[in-house]
Image (cartoon, helix red, strand yellow):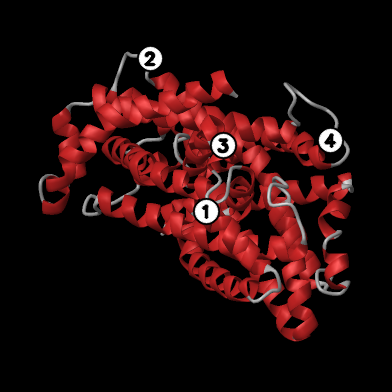
Amino acid sequence: MATAGSAIGLGNIWRFPFMVGEHGGGAFIAAYMICSLFIALPCFICESLIGRRSRSGVYGAFKKQAPGTGWKYMGALSVFACFVLVSFYSVVGGWSLDFLVRAVGGGLTRGGTEGALTVFPRMAASPWESVLMSLAFLFATAFIVLGGIKKGIERFTKIMIPLLFVLMVALVVFSLSLPGSSEGVRYLLKPDMGKLGPDGWACALGQAFFSMSLGVGTILVYSSFMKKDHGLLEVGLWTSVSDAAFAIIAGFAIMPAVFSAGLAPGAGPSLVYETLPFIFARMSEEAPVLGYLVSVAFFLAILMAALTSSISIYEVCVEHAVEQFGSSRIVATAEFLAPAALLSVPCALSFGLLGDFKILGLTVFDLCDTLTSNVLMTLGALGFALFVGWRMKKADVVDEFTNGGTLGFSGKVFGVFYFLVRWVVPPVILLIFVSNLVLK
């Protein structure tokens, strides 16, 4: 449940719908499903396998498995990626916190559908509001991480993930009842191959990695706590299917409402936060009490989903400091909190005060997003796959994959997994990565 909580989060609710909007609707969904099953799932198992085998953090895992080699720098890269990731992710988490506060105060449903469409622009235009909410979310993440995997993270996710799933299904039903919603359904199901291309495939792969928290060591760290009687294939399939299903559900909750509200489906990162207030305002016109209660419950759940992902990212950094530098958990949490907070400020201001400030043609927020999801996570997943496929002893890989030969089905499909990890996953990741760089 903890690994599913790490995977199921804002990557599904916030990022997936606008990625679908930018890259051809159904064409992107098809590319995403292919990448999730044949690339992301084997990478998930690779990361899990390294973590449980080593019982260490991401840096220490490579030092144990490949002592005296340069593989430890792969671990250092993962820690850096998590630092950047948690810094800009806290901005989106801050939006969720902000909207929860507004929902509790009735601010999302009071102004009708027209007023609802102005909520996000007004929030983004307020630099103090954006920054304070981002920092509040980051501090909340740090506080939960202090509790550790068992007391803080696992207990938290067991309650919130099922609640979020139920609320998302309810939103799908309501969203499909809105006038003009059929255009959103058609958009999701009708593939536009012209909008896919190398960039679309790279984003589909990046989305699969981003959504499942791959390539940065989060799954590796969680798996280092996994019991030996848990099947890696079983956990991987459960997480992958749950994650993909949740992303599709989010698409059907958001896109029909996007078209009903007259918004552009390729509006970018703010799409969901412009659409959701419209849904709840529309719901309140028919049933005020229901609209209020659902809006509060939903943004509480979406905030929890954001936290389940952010704490898994932050945990990689904390585990590294505890293991490699002997820091206490409190000190380790504080060591990463200050620099992450500093980076989150310009990320938060990218939608307002620093909107015109660009680096390589990208805002600070977009630069951090692109750097992590399309570069660092992709290269990280490639490194994990190469390590399992070509550096680890095959006997060790078989032992972990089959739990010492006790899992019959895992033993039967091991050959397929090992073939994918050695001969399919690395060249496909490289092909998509290089094609995107050259042809973009």
The amino acid type found where label 3 is placed reads Ala
The amino acid type found where label 2 is placed reads Gly
Residue at the spot of label 3: 332
The amino acid type found where label 1 is placed reads Gly
User: For the residue carrying disc 4, how many other residues have a C-alpha within 10 Å: few (<14), some (14-19), or many (20+)?
Assistant: some
Q: Nearer the viewer, mark 1 or mark 2?
A: 2
Q: Is residue 146 visible?
A: no
Residue at the spot of label 1: 147
Q: Position of residue 206 (x, y in %)?
A: 51, 37
Q: Earlier in the sequence, mark 3 or mark 4?
A: 3
Residue at the spot of label 2: 70
Q: Earlier in the sequence, mark 2 or mark 4?
A: 2
Q: Nearer the viewer, residue 217 or 15?
A: 15
Secondary element under disc 3, as helix, strand or loop, is helix
Residue at the spot of label 4: 355
Q: Residue at x 80, y 66 (%)?
A: 102
Q: Nearer the viewer, mark 3 or mark 4?
A: 4
Q: Residue at x 70, y 69 (%)?
A: 180
User: For the residue carrying disc 2, how many other residues have a C-alpha within 10 Å: few (<14), some (14-19), or many (20+)?
Assistant: few
Q: Nearer the viewer, residue 11 or 336?
A: 11
Secondary element under disc 1, as helix, strand or loop, is loop
